[in-house]
Amino acid sequence: MNVKPALALTLISGVAAAQPAPPATPAPVNVESTLSPSKAADDPNAKPKGPKRGDFDAGGQVRLPNGPDEEGKYATFNWVAVDLRAKYYLLDTVTIGANIPVALIHPDTVGMMGPEPQMIGGMSATLDARLPKMPKMPFMKYDAEIGLLATVAYMREGALLLSEKDFPLFAGDFKPGFVGGLTTKVKLSNLVDFSLVPTWVYQSGTTASHQAVQLPTSLILKLGDVVKVAADLGIYTGDDYTFGGAGGGRIATGASLDVKLGKILAHAGIGFASLLTGPLYPTVGDSVYIDLNVKFAK
């Protein structure tokens, strides 16, 4: 029997079995799907999702301003105002808003011989259109966003001249009015914004028309996407552009807090409706206001 061929065959088989198997070809890796999330998370220019065409929000603002009762004494709960509001995004940068102010609680008269307030203040519709973003000028350090504001209203005479901080003195007949102005928002940093909304107000009257200028401003501190804190300052003239307190002019100041919880936007504010004294507010303490706002946003 020839043993050598069998032995050789056995050795060759053992060597072949001892050799390691060739490495398996790795599956192709989708580099884009792997890197995109981390790249998006690390992108400093990534912006949070904002409202878009077809979105809307609706809700109501409850205001507790100081105001006089039948005896002329000022207190917080003499007046309770509710502003019913809604906003629809016609385009990403164009919105249409509606507002119906209601004096839910009010005295029968303001003072012993004053006007007789009514519950319904009227209604208004506002078109707010942001202008295309302009290239940053060499001398400009901050980004700015500017829009056009136009409001048509049918409200109690003189009601269009009141600010959101004033007690809702809705008296007299309904008269048409118009408000035109600019919405200006300056991004001072990733956390701080500055807002200025200068407007011109016109409303027809029984014997003469009413004109005024309003300059509300806000310095807004954003604490993430959920919380915002703002310091507010507003200048409001009386009829016929009167800045003094004796003619109905006011300088309002206060602070507010906004919290976003899912689709619910909650707002709370407190301050003074006027630092100027006059017939509307005999003392600064008489002008304290509180406002609460809850909206559903989609």
Image (tube, grey):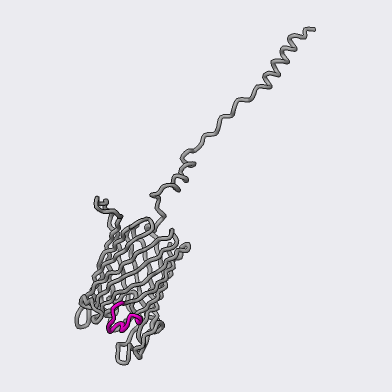
Is residue 23 shown left or right of residue 73? right
Q: Does the magenta stretch include residue 59?
A: no
The residue located at (36%, 67%) in the rendering is 231
Task: Give the main secondary structure of the magenta stretch.
Answer: loop
The residue located at (28%, 78%) in the rendering is 276
Q: In which quarter of the image is residue 5?
A: top right
Residue at the outermost right position: 1
Is residue 279 shown left or right of residue 15? left
Q: In which quarter of the image is residue 54?
A: bottom left
Q: Residue 19 versus residue 277: which sits nearer the camera?
A: 277
Q: Position of residue 72 (x, y in %)?
A: 34, 89
How many dots with numbers? 0
Q: Does the magenta stretch include residue 285?
A: yes
Quarter holding the C terminus is bottom left
Q: Position of residue 81 (x, y in %)?
A: 38, 78
Q: Where is residue 13 in the image (x, y as percent from the top left)?
A: 70, 18
Q: What range of the chain is rendered magenta?
A: 275-286
Q: Residue 289 versus residue 59: which sits nearer the camera?
A: 289
Is residue 210 shown left or right of residue 54? left
Q: In which quarter of the image is residue 289?
A: bottom left
Q: Residue 146 versus residue 204: which sits nearer the camera?
A: 146
